[in-house]
């Protein structure tokens, strides 16, 4: 930290009966009242340097011994006034980054200019400010922080703008050219006189060395500083993102799901109410969102989703939430399932998580570039598009970023895995409507799911958590499942799942028996009639079953147990019993080949209990027919 000393006389100010005086052989003749404090001083040293005191003294009535002057609106308080008074008396004073703003505002108020006396206080403070303060890293930051107490004066005297420009120029400069007098978190104290030995020079440890230091600024000054840094155009977007992440972790509080906001972060007074603290954090959050770089990857998906969670709890503006959703959509493949579990605090529903917001994020992901027709209908849940003011300002840049970062095929495969894992988490919510679960599941294009094991897990969890679903609702839920994409293990589990609709169980058994016939080793090829039936379902029976997906961790109660599976005989018996009990099959549901669906199911359930022997018999009959022909 740099400092400047002025004057040579010892300090002779003292206090008697709440009155501050100065030791002198000459009796005092001037009383100055400053915000409740009274000073008993002398006219000559003060009026010779302070033009304002000259005018006020001439306007105020003079008593027999002392003349009274009131300075009610004095900037900087008694400390700043006493510093100016000591300068007038020639008493030694020390000016540093901590008190230069108050001293400069006080000197301006007293009009201690060169017109009154050469080498007056304003001139000396300006020289020190321009030559020393603005050249030091910490000095500029500390000075900028202190302007918060005198915002109007600091703006009028251009102290704030000059500090911001100095900080931004150091961030934009090459690291080797930056003289760092101090860094809050990594460097020791360096008190050096501006007129003394040369200042120690510290080289930054990394390109993002400045992020932690400017995080000490209040949000208004921080916002202006970051805008100045961004406008320079030399700072990489990921460094800007790192700085914003540091600032958010420094000032945004830990927020519980019920909306309680801790007052420890960003609170200036214990007297602030919870609503005032929440409002302050909301403004801070929205300012951070407005500073986010538009480039993809500048900040992580995890950080963006944490901001989105905070925005939900702090009840931020809808435009801020939409802005975050758009940015998350650009890089959704990097997210984790836990990141997408955004708490819902809406009074319109009792769901645990904000599924609507995740649907918006999914739509934004699929809308990157020229989205293929596999993207979900944007009106599926009736979401309404809103454009934020900040989004309008960066619309061109954002669209360019979107076109240059079109979602690739591999990223859609990753997102499909993430979504299926997300479905498994939200399926446990007893208040989650079936329509929203299905909407999330159907938002993923069919080609993005190489297998449906994770989706089946989610459906199974949802059925267990919602035992009151009727047959129609269970059928509607299971329509999103493609039994052809289930692994052998998933088929074995589904064949015994009493929660599934009968049609799904029959379909799973059919595919399982067909694949088992091909995998048994005794049959080299299926009969033509069975192959034709499989072809109508789009199945290649020669393809080995897909491996079971293990992308998500499943609780013990939701895991599939392979041991203890029922035998084919018992499975078919169960199926016959369920078919006899089921009275909800639609007789008009016709297969494209003209076969009544009800008849097909009953015929399939009449299959022998030993499928391999049955398929061998069919194969032999088919071969004999061919030989005769």
Image: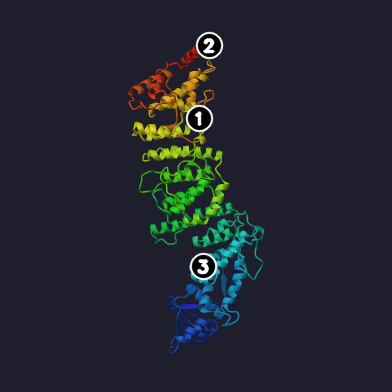
Q: Is residue 220 above or below residue 101?
A: above
Q: Where is the N terminus found, in terms of image quarters?
A: bottom right
> Which of the two discs, 1 and 2, sits closer to the camera?
2
The disc at residue 147 is 3
**Would you identify the image quadrant in which residue 503 lies?**
top left
Q: Is residue 88 above or below residue 134?
A: below
> CB atoms at circles 1 and 2 under 8 Å apart?
no
x and y percent of residue 598 in the render? 38, 23
Q: Is residue 595 above or below residue 397?
A: above
Q: Classify mark 1: residues with Cα within 10 Å, few (<14), some (14-19) or many (20+).
A: some
* Secondary structure of residue under mark 1: loop
> Mark 1 or 3 closer to N-term?
3
* Secondary structure of residue under mark 3: helix
Q: Classify mark 2: residues with Cα within 10 Å, few (<14), some (14-19) or many (20+).
A: few
Residue beneath disc 2: 629
Residue beneath disc 1: 548
């Amino acid at each position: 930290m740099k400092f400047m000393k002025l004057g040579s006389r010892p300090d002779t100010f003292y206090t008697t009966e709440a009155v501050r005086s100065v030791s002198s052989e000459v009796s005092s003749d001037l009383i100055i009242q400053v915000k409740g404090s009274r000073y008993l001083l002398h006219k000559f040293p003060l009026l010779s340097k302070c033009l304002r005191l000259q005018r006020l003294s001439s306007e105020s009535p003079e008593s027999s011994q002392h003349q009274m002057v009131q300075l009610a609106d004095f900037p900087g308080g008694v400390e700043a006034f006493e510093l100016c008074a000591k300068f007038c008396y020639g008493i030694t004073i020390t000016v540093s980054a901590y008190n230069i703003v108050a001293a400069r505002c006080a000197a301006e108020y007293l009009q201690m200019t060169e017109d009154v006396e050469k080498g007056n206080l304003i001139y000396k403070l300006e020289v020190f400010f321009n030559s020393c303060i603005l050249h030091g890293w910490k000095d500029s930051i500390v000075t900028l922080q202190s302007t918060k107490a005198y915002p109007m004066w600091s703006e009028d005297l251009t102290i704030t703008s000059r500090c911001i420009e100095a900080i931004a120029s150091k961030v934009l400069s090459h690291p080797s050219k930056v003289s760092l007098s101090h860094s809050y978190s990594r460097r020791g104290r360096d008190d050096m006189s501006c007129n003394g030995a040369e200042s120690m020079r510290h080289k930054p440890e990394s390109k993002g060395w400045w992020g932690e230091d400017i995080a000490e600024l209040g949000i208004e000054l921080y916002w202006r500083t970051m805008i100045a840094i961004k406008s320079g155009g030399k700072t990489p977007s990921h460094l800007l993102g790192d700085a914003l992440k540091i600032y958010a972790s420094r000032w945004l509080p830990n927020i519980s799901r019920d909306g309680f906001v801790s007052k420890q972060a960003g609170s200036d007074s214990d007297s602030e109410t919870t609503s005032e603290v929440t409002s302050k954090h909301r403004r801070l959050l929205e300012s951070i969102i407005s500073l986010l770089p538009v480039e993809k990857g500048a900040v992580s998906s995890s950080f963006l989703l944490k901001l989105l969670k905070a925005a939900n709890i702090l009840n931020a503006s809808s435009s801020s939430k939409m802005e975050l959703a758009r940015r998350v959509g650009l890089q959704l493949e990097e997210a984790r399932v836990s990141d997408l579990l955004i708490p819902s605090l809406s009074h319109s529903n009792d769901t645990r998580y904000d599924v609507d917001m995740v649907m918006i994020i999914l739509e934004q992901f699929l809308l990157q570039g020229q989205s293929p027709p596999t993207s979900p209908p944007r009106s599926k849940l009736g979401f309404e598009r809103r454009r934020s003011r900040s989004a309008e300002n960066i619309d061109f840049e954002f669209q360019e970023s979107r076109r240059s970062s079109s979602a690739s095929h591999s990223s859609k495969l990753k997102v499909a895995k993430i979504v299926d894992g997300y479905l498994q988490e939200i399926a446990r919510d007893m208040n989650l409507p079936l329509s929203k679960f299905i909407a999330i599941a159907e938002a993923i294009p069919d080609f993005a799911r190489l297998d449906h094991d994770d989706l089946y897990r989610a459906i199974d969890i949802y059925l267990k958590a919602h035992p009151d679903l009727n047959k129609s609702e269970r059928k509607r839920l299971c329509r999103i499942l493609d039994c052809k994409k289930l692994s052998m293990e998933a088929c074995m589990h589904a064949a015994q799942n009493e929660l599934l609709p009968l049609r799904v169980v029959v379909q799973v058994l059919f595919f399982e028996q067909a694949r088992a016939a091909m995998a048994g080793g005794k049959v080299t090829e299926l009969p033509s009639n069975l192959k034709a039936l499989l072809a109508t379902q789009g199945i290649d029976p020669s393809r080995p079953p897909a491996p079971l997906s293990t992308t998500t961790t499943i609780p013990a109660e939701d895991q599939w147990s392979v041991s203890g599976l029922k035998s084919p005989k018992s499975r078919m018996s169960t199926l016959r019993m369920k078919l006899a009990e089921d009275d909800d099959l639609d007789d008009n549901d016709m297969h494209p080949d003209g076969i009544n669906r009800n008849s097909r199911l009953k015929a399939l359930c009449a299959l022998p209990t030993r499928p391999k022997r049955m398929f061998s018999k069919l194969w032999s009959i088919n071969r004999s027919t061919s030989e005769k022909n």
